[in-house]
């Protein structure tokens, strides 16, 4: 955990301890030992818990204490996130996640898929226990958007027709929607003001887009020691993200066709480095960084509607954390 993440989460350190106990109990199976073995491994390699931190911070934005619904909301958001990662790693044939072997690497695809399904079922149970129509409706919509975002990415990878508008819709669905939901549910568990709820939804959406943009830069120029996974994974899977999309937009028709052909056949490290060089020279990374800053500023503006507090300051630091994440 980075020093900045520790600083962000410091005002809610006790909340996080309580959440971790709640989360493990929430996920454990009373019948199947193998599920609990995988869950224990997931908890051990849990990463930053970024959505959990956001949810807990947002629950305190109006200076109210978190409650059982807050922890249930944070747990549901994290369960949905981890379940999608399990399925992502199967689709991507990924072997490393957060610097650790993936579940599919250790237990193979079948167990990884079934544990992901188990987690989705636990999320559904949690959703019903929220006993709040707005929260249930939101999470049902998020579940649909998560699937649509993942499937659309695969579809665009197959036919290479991804443009900037489609890209932003896709990352809004597959990443930003869940971060937005975590922020909203955290606030909604303690404060039912509709105007503030709308603001925190937008905050989470903008932060989520900026977060995914940074991850997509990592997939071009990332260092495994900083990112916890191999770079160029998207390129190897023919996924066109913003650095590629912008680079392609600067090319003439012939260069564009040659570049797309190069991506399709590139397997060796030398060819991947050649493509990386083209993206950098065509300002694909610079353009993506400009968009990160744009969406980060939009996220900060939404926080203007909330009173000053250490929790609001931590949310601002969360935006800055994403801006400063190392490649």
Image (spheres, rainbow, N blue to C red):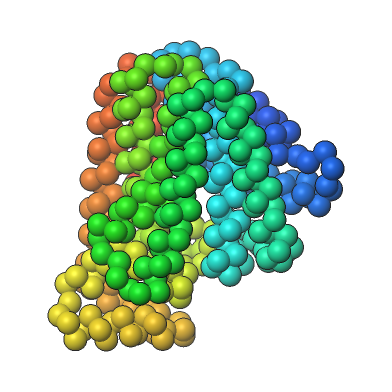
Residue 80 on image: x %, y %: 56, 44
Q: Residue at x 83, y 47 (%)?
A: 32
* Left or right of residue 134, residue 209 in this image: left
Residue 8 in sight in this render: no
Residue, far top: 64
* Left or right of residue 136, residue 161 in this image: left
Q: Is residue 308 above or below residue 160?
A: above
Between 116 and 255, the residue placed more toward the observer is: 116
Q: Is residue 102 above or below residue 57?
A: below
* Left or right of residue 175, residue 303 in this image: left
Q: Name the quadrant of the C terminus.
A: bottom left
Residue 61 in sight in this render: yes
Q: Is residue 137 above or below residue 64?
A: below
Q: Residue at x 74, y 51 (%)?
A: 38
Residue 199, quarter of the rendered image:
top left
Residue 178 on image: x %, y %: 46, 42
Q: Residue at x 58, y 70 (%)?
A: 93
Q: Name the quadrant of the N terminus.
A: top right
Q: Residue at x 41, y 43 (%)?
A: 177
Between 202 and 306, the residue placed more toward the observer is: 202
Between 280 and 166, the residue placed more toward the observer is: 166
């Amino acid at each position: 955990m980075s020093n900045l993440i520790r600083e962000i989460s410091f005002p809610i350190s006790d909340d996080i301890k309580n959440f971790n106990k709640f989360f493990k109990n929430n996920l454990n199976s009373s019948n199947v030992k193998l599920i609990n073995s995988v869950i224990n491994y997931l908890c051990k390699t849990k990463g930053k818990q970024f959505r959990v931190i956001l949810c807990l911070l947002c629950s305190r934005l109006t200076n109210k204490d978190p409650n059982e619904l807050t922890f249930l909301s944070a747990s549901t958001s994290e369960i949905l996130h981890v379940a999608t990662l399990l399925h992502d790693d199967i689709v991507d044939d990924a072997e490393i996640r957060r610097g650790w072997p993936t579940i599919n690497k250790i237990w193979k695809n079948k167990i990884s898929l079934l544990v992901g399904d188990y987690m989705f079922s636990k999320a559904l149970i949690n959703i019903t226990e929220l006993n709040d129509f707005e929260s249930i409706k939101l999470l049902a919509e998020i579940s649909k958007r998560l699937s649509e975002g993942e499937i659309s990415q695969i579809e665009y990878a197959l036919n290479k027709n991804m443009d900037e508008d489609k890209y932003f819709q896709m990352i809004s669905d597959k990443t930003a929607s869940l971060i937005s939901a975590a922020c909203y549910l955290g606030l909604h568990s303690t404060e039912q003001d509709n105007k503030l709820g709308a603001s925190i939804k937008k905050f989470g959406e903008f932060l989520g887009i900026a977060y995914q943009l940074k991850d997509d830069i990592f997939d071009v120029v990332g260092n495994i020691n900083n990112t916890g996974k191999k770079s160029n994974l998207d390129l190897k899977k023919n996924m066109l993200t913003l650095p590629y999309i912008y680079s392609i937009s600067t090319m003439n028709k012939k260069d564009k066709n040659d570049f797309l052909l190069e991506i399709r056949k590139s397997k060796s490290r030398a060819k991947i480095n050649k493509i990386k060089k083209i993206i950098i020279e065509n300002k694909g990374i610079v353009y993506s960084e400009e968009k990160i800053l744009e969406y980060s500023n939009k996220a900060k503006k939404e926080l203007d509607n909330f009173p000053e507090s250490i929790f609001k300051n931590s949310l601002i630091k969360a935006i800055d954390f994403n801006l400063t994440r190392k490649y």
